[in-house]
Image (cartoon, helix red, strand yellow):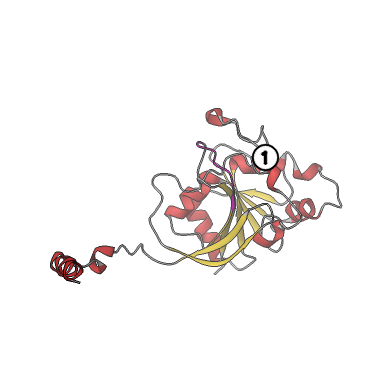
Amino acid sequence: MRRLIASTFVSLDGVMQAPGGPEEDPTQHFEFGGWTFSYWDESIDISGAGFDSKGRELVLGRKTYEIFEAYWPYQPAGDPTARSLNAARKHVASRTLKSVKWNNSSLLQGDAAAAIGALKKQPGLDLQIIGSGNLIQTLQRASLIDEYNVWTFPVVLGKGKRLFEEGAKPGALRLVRTQASKSGVVMSAYVPAGDVKPGSFANDAPSEKEVARRKKMEREG
């Protein structure tokens, strides 16, 4: 079965909205578009987390597809990221789009989770989600995402669309790799690790009787 990998940029408080520029997604009066810009340096390699889709097929929500379709086809042919994204096969989840024009793009039919679940069962390259916050919410609740590549930038935004919104399915994650850039971006990958396992430190605390015994010893000592 093909793996489904989600890659996204988030702020320290979990916001993923409009990381690339002011016009990317100003909905809900979001005024911090482009908040990742000042943290990019030579130690950051976007291919390492699949942000260039090299060797994978793309799965995109409508908003991210429209942003990409309006930008990447018009970049210089020598740009390796543009070359990779333009060449990749793209599966677009949308209830409103009637057609998609970007090279190698096709619309998913019917329920997005069911359609992407069926894609995973087909032979082929792994599937890569970039951005597409609403789609990530849907696929996370359906337990379809096999890996999360989350790049956490050292900035607090206070508002905006978050990677895991209220209603996300509870679950544990296991860190499989991590690296920090010179500018403080923490680039981490997680895989699902089963259910949340609550516990309590109360069992490790001394009993009231033991506390009283220790105080008595301190007074007598």
Which SS does the magenta portion mostly show?
loop
> Can you say which quadrant of the picture contains the C terminus?
bottom left
Q: Would you say residue 156 sits in the magenta stretch? A: yes
> Can you say which quadrant of the picture contains the N terminus?
bottom right
Q: Residue at x 15, y 68 (%)?
A: 216
Q: Residue at x 72, y 61 (%)?
A: 54
Q: Residue at x 60, y 39 (%)?
A: 63
Q: Residue pushed farthest front?
A: 221
In the shown orientation, is residue 167 left or right of residue 66?
left
| Residue topped by disc 1 | 67
In the shown orientation, is residue 18 left or right of residue 213?
right
In percent of width and height, residue 145 lies at: 51, 59
The one nearer the camera, 214 or 206, is: 214
Q: Secondary structure at mark 1?
A: helix
Is 65 above or below relative to 179?
A: above
In the shown orientation, is residue 66 left or right of residue 134?
right
Tag 1: residue type?
Ile
Q: How many marks?
A: 1
The one nearer the camera, 191 or 10, is: 10
Residue 111 visible (yes or no): no
In percent of width and height, residue 215 lies at: 18, 65
Residue 194 visible (yes or no): yes
In the shown orientation, is residue 220 left or right of residue 199?
left
Q: Quadrant of residue 24?
A: top right
In percent of width and height, residue 149 lies at: 58, 58
In percent of width and height, residue 36 lies at: 65, 44
Q: Residue at x 68, y 49 (%)?
A: 105
The magenta-colored residue range is 152-159
